[in-house]
Every structure is written in structure tokens, then in C-alpha cells.
């Protein structure tokens, strides 16, 4: 049976607050109160020392990573107090802390280097495997669009990871939990940065890596909204030699996983490309990949969006209404077309992530805002849809132009009337 597992997002919100407990998404595995890690006993048995040594041998640790003492991280996070909590989920809790710029000792809050300290829950082998994968991958992989792993702690039964602090939190938080909508140009910048991160993993890393859990909660933002991928607990080495895929247990997050991977367990880099297409749709529409609060037929974002992706005259229905026309017409069209390619049911027809990067590069800088387009304003005012009343209202508003067209002769009249009729037809 296929099973889905969600790895904890690094943090739910950019500030130290309790939004994780107050506002849960359908995919959120967070709980209401943080569980602080257990403080190790002052007496350590020979058995525990031996166990720790074996675990350290099991780790493939990069020499650049710092090794932290548990008590130092305890002090750095102010004893893992709730006020330091950044987020929580299936993996464990994430706390804000402060350490020396170039060392491991804790420092006074607000000084030194700000970090995010992720703890591992003590229940289950899977969590330990994910912890090892995180250290293995992020210890070796360095890229501007990957969250930097600074170091780790492995002491008795404690497993902690120390990351660079990402002050603006997750893309999920900005898309779905904030009252102010994320501006269009920033959305496209984030999409480009995340695409660069995936392209590096697939095509530029020393060994190809399949991310396997690409979603909005795993895309973190620095102070300048630069996107960085986090949470490599489900990542897998890509196929080697003549192999076309990796056969593995199906894991990830429902709504983002590629259908062929869910059906067969065959994992490829094109599985990540599909997930990228889902996230790009979320950024275009402001809708979650899965939302059971939507009307019937709209629970699954991909299935709802597919009919609109191929219709140039209807793609406006995909756009997040909170943008109120402040988006590039050309950019939105190209982004919708790119999402359709990424979501192709045939994995081989999906683009490489390097191709996705090239397609996205010009989009953040496009200035043809839809708000200045009469075509968009007309459609937006009747966006409520395809009801007869809405269509009649639009038709009544356009009638003067149609009458004006009847007094104009020649090719210009034909083109004008035809365009206006197409606008009306797009609501059918």
C-alpha cells in the first residue's frame, strides 16, 4: 500500500509566534505545544557512549560541519522555551537560537549568528533515517538556493541539526496564511530561485539528487525573498549508469507527488518536475494543492486547473484574485504554459529543471500589468463566472461597442467585433 509521510517544514512563520498552533493547513502535522528535547542525564553509561560512537561512524559528515554539544544548543535556544519556537511537525520542533559567528558556543540573544535548531522526535526509526539523510545531503551540497546546514549534535539519544536562520519563513506561510498577498514579481523570483535549487540537485551536483518532497512549506525565504530548499529527509540519490529510475517506497506529500511515482514507486528527476508544476500553480492561483474546503470539483488544484491551462482566453481564471490585476499578462501566460508542461502526464514530456530556469528568468522583470488592461478589467468584474446573469451583465456592458462596430466598415470592424465576441464567449 502506498503511504505518504510529511517531513516537518523548517518553520511555519518568520517571527517567533504561535501561528503554527493557531492556523493549520490540511497537510500540517504540527501539534499545539512544543515538546522540548529531553535533557541528558549527568551520568552517561558505557553503552550510550558506544551507541553514540557507532552513530558517528554511520554518519557521512562533511568536514565543514560544526559538531555541537547538546547543552550549548540548549543555552543557545534559551532552554527550548516556547518563545523560541519557530515551527513543528512530523520530524520535530524548530527553535531560534544564537551562537558564535565561527564557533559552537551559545551567545546572548540578538548577537552573534542567528540559527534555526531542529530537534528529532524520539519516536521511530524513520525519523533517524531522515536525520541521517539530511546530514548526508546538506553536508555535501552547497548552493545559494539550498538552506545551509551549519552543524549537528548527536549525543546520547539527542539528534539536532543547526541551520542558517531564514527570517521570512516559508513560502506556504506567505501564500496561504498572510493577509497581504505576495506581489507578483516576488512570486516569480521565488519560483526562479526554487527552480535553480532543483536544477542544481538534478544536473549540477556531483551525484544527482532527487528531492522527493518539493512543496511550499519546504521553500524558505531569506530577508530579500531569495528562495532556498530545506528538509532533505526524503531525498534520494538519482539513478546511476543505465538505470532510468530509482525504485523506492512511496513517500512525500499528497497533492504534490507525481502520479506515476504514486502508482509504481519509480522515482526520477521528472517526479520533482511535476511537484514544481504543482507549486507553480499554487503561486499563480493562491490555492492549495489540496483543499477540501473548496466546492466539489475544486479540491484537487491540478485537476481543477488543467482545463484552463490549455485555454489562453480562460487562463485568467487561474490567477490569484488577491493580486487584483497586479501581475504581468505575458508573464502569467508563460507561467501557466510552463506549469502545464511540468504537469504533463507523460514524465518524458516534462522539461528538465534547467529548461524551467531558462523559461522563468525573464518573468520577474515583465511590466505589462494586467490592471491597466481593459480586457482584464472586464473579465475580472465578471469573474464570478459563467452564470447567465454574469454573461448577460458583460454582454450589456459591451453592447455599445458592438453597436459602434456596426457603423464601422471593413477589416477593422470585423476584427473589433470578433474580439469582443471572444471575450463574451470566454465566460461560456
Image (spheres, grey):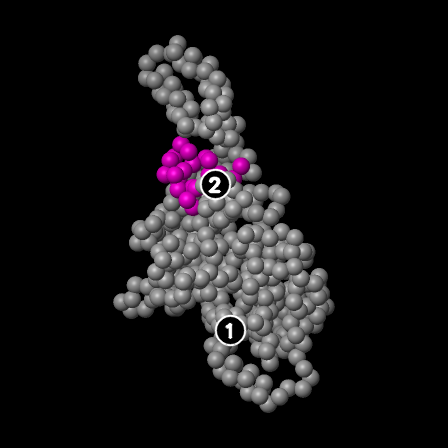
Quarter-wise, where is residue 110 in the image? bottom right
Please identify, in this view, whether the residue under mark 2 or under mark 1 is nearer the observer: 2
Foreground pick, 251 / 79: 251
Residue bearing mark 1 = 125
Looking at the image, the residue that sits furthest to the left is 242
Task: Give me the residue at 38% from left, 35% from top.
Answer: 311
Residue bearing mark 2 = 296
- Please tell me whether residue 96 is drawn above or below residue 343 in the rendered image: below
Q: Residues within 10 Å of mark 1 (few under 14, many from 20)?
A: few
Looking at the image, the residue that sits furthest to the front is 1
| SS for callout 2 | loop
Mark 2 to mark 1 CA distance (whole Å):
38 Å
| SS for callout 1 | helix
Q: Start and end of the magenta stretch?
A: 302-321
- Please tell me whether residue 94 is drawn above or below residue 154 in the rendered image: above
Q: Does 315 lie within the magenta span? A: yes
The quadrant of the picture occupied by the N terminus is: bottom left
Q: Does 107 lie within the magenta span? A: no
- Please tell me whether residue 185 is drawn above or below residue 154 in the rendered image: above
Q: Earlier in the sequence, mark 2 or mark 1?
A: 1
Residue 128 place in picture, x, y as percent: 52, 73
377 vs 349, left or right, is: right
Q: Residues within 10 Å of mark 2 (few under 14, many from 20)?
A: few
Task: Give me the residue at 51% from left, 53% from top.
Answer: 216
Instruction: Label the magenta part by its dominant secondary structure.
Output: helix
**Residue 390 appears in view:** yes
257 vs 171, left or right, is: left
Task: Give me the residue at 70% from left, 70% from top.
Answer: 79
Amino acid at each position: 500500500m502506498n503511504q505518504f509521510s510529511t517531513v516537518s517544514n523548517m518553520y511555519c512563520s518568520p517571527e517567533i509566534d504561535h501561528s503554527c498552533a493557531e492556523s493549520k493547513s490540511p497537510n500540517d502535522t504540527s501539534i499545539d505545544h512544543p515538546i522540548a528535547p529531553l535533557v541528558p542525564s549527568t551520568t552517561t553509561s558505557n553503552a550510550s557512549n558506544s551507541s553514540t560512537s557507532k552513530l558517528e561512524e554511520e554518519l557521512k559528515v562533511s568536514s565543514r560541519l560544526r559538531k555541537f554539544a547538546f547543552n550549548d544548543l540548549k543555552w543557545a535556544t534559551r532552554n527550548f522555551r516556547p518563545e523560541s519556537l519557530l515551527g513543528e511537525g512530523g520530524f520535530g520542533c524548530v527553535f531560534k537560537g544564537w551562537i558564535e559567528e565561527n564557533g559552537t558556543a551559545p551567545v546572548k540573544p540578538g548577537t552573534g549568528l542567528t540559527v534555526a535548531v531542529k530537534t528529532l522526535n524520539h519516536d521511530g526509526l524513520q525519523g533517524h533515517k531522515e536525520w541521517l539523510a539530511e546530514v548526508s545531503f546538506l553536508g555535501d551540497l552547497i548552493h545559494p538556493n539550498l538552506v545551509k546546514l551549519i552543524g549537528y549534535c548527536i549525543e546520547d539519544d539527542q539528534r539536532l541539526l543547526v541551520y542558517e536562520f531564514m527570517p521570512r519563513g516559508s513560502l506556504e506561510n506567505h501564500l496561504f496564511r498572510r493577509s497581504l498577498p505576495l506581489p507578483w514579481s516576488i512570486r516569480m523570483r521565488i519560483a526562479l530561485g526554487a527552480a535553480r535549487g532543483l536544477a542544481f540537485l538534478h544536473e549540477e551536483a556531483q551525484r544527482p539528487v532527487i528531492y522527493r518532497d518539493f512543496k511550499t512549506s519546504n521553500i524558505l525565504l531569506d530577508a530579500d525573498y531569495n528562495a532556498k530548499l530545506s528538509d532533505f529527509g526524503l531525498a534520494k540519490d538519482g539513478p546511476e549508469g543505465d538505470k532510468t529510475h530509482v525504485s523506492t517506497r512511496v513517500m512525500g506529500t499528497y497533492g504534490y507527488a507525481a502520479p506515476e511515482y504514486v502508482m509504481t514507486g519509480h522515482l526520477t528527476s521528472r517526479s520533482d518536475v511535476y511537484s514544481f508544476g504543482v507549486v507553480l500553480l499554487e503561486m499563480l492561483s493562491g490555492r492549495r494543492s489540496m483543499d477540501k474546503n473548496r466546492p466539489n470539483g475544486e479540491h484537487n488544484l491540478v485537476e481543477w486547473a488543467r482545463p484552463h491551462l490549455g485555454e489562453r482566453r480562460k487562463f485568467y481564471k487561474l490567477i490569484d484574485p488577491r493580486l487584483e490585476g497586479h501581475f504581468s499578462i505575458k508573464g502569467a501566460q508563460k507561467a501557466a504554459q510552463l506549469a502545464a508542461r511540468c504537469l504533463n502526464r507523460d514524465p518524458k514530456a516534462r522539461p528538465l529543471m534547467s529548461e524551467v530556469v531558462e523559461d522563468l528568468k525573464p518573468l520577474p522583470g515583465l511590466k505589462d500589468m494586467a490592471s491597466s488592461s481593459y480586457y482584464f478589467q472586464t473579465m475580472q468584474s465578471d469573474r464570478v463566472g459563467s452564470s447567465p446573469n454574469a454573461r448577460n451583465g458583460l454582454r450589456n456592458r459591451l453592447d455599445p461597442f458592438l453597436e459602434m462596430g456596426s457603423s464601422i466598415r471593413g477589416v477593422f470592424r470585423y476584427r473589433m467585433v470578433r474580439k469582443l465576441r471572444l471575450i463574451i464567449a470566454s465566460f461560456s
